[in-house]
Amino acid sequence: MIVRHLGKTPVIDPTATVAPTAVVSGDVTLGPGVRILHGAVLTAENGRIAVGSDVVVMENAVVKARAGHDVEIGDAVVIGPHVHLNGARVGDECFLATGAAIFPGAVIESGCEVRIRGVVQVNTTLAKGTIVPIGWIAVGSPASMLPPEKHEEVWAIQQDLDFTGTVYGMERESTMREILRSQSEFYGAHAHDEIVG
C-alpha cells in the first residue's frame, strides 16, 4: 500500500517492488531493485526515508523517520524480518539480522552486521565493518559492545545519550502522561492520510 502522508507521496523507482501487504508512507524514496516484502512498514513521520539500490526490507520490518531523524539506507543492504530501524543512517553492504533494533541518531557505517536481536542505541556510531554479536548492545560513539547482562554498564553510557530527547523530543524528566499526550497528538496526523497505490 502506498500512502500520501502530510502531502508527501512516496517516490518508487520503476524497478522496485512493494508487496501488497507492505506499507510505504510519506516522504520515502525507493531506489532501483529495492524489495519491500510482506508486512514491512516504511513510514516517514515529518522526516525522510531514502533507500539506495538493491536493498531488501524483509517481512514485518519497521523503518521510521521523524523530523530531525531522517533514515538513509545505502546500497546492497539487508533489513531482516522484524527489524526496527528508527531515524538512523545505514551505510552500503550492511546486514541487519532478524529482530535487530536501531535507534534514532545511530550511524552504521558500511559493511557492518547487527546480528539477531542486536541493539544499536540512540546516538551510537558503529565504525566500518563492526559486528554486533547476537543479542548484544552497541552504545556510545564510538560504540562500546556489551552483552545484555551488563545492563548497569550499558545504562552508565546510555544515560548521557539523551534517549528521551532524541526519541520523543522532550526533556528527560517528562512523565509518561506528557510523553504520550505529545505522541498521540503527533500521530493524529495520520487521520488525513490518503492511499494512492
Image (tube, rainbow, N blue to C red):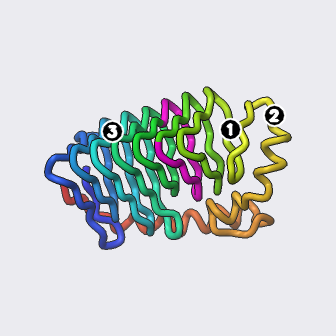
**Label 3 crowding class (10 Å Cα cut-off): few <14, some 14-19, many 20+?**
many
Element type at mark 3: strand
139, 45: nearer the viewer: 139
Query: Given contact means CB atoms under 8 Å apart, are the residues at marks 2 and 1 in contact?
Result: yes
**52 horizontally vs 90: left or right:** left
Q: Which mark sits nearer the N-terminus, 1 or 3? A: 3
Q: Residue at x 45, y 40 (%)?
A: 94
Q: Which residues are magenta?
A: 96-110
Element type at mark 2: loop
Q: Position of residue 35 (x, y in %)?
A: 27, 40
Q: Which mark is residue 137?
A: 1
Could you tell me the amino acid type at mark 2?
Answer: Lys
Could you tell me the amino acid type at mark 3?
Answer: Val
User: Mark 2 to mark 1: distance in Å?
Assistant: 9 Å
Residue, disc 2: 150
Q: Residue at x 80, y 65 (%)?
A: 173
Residue, disc 3: 56
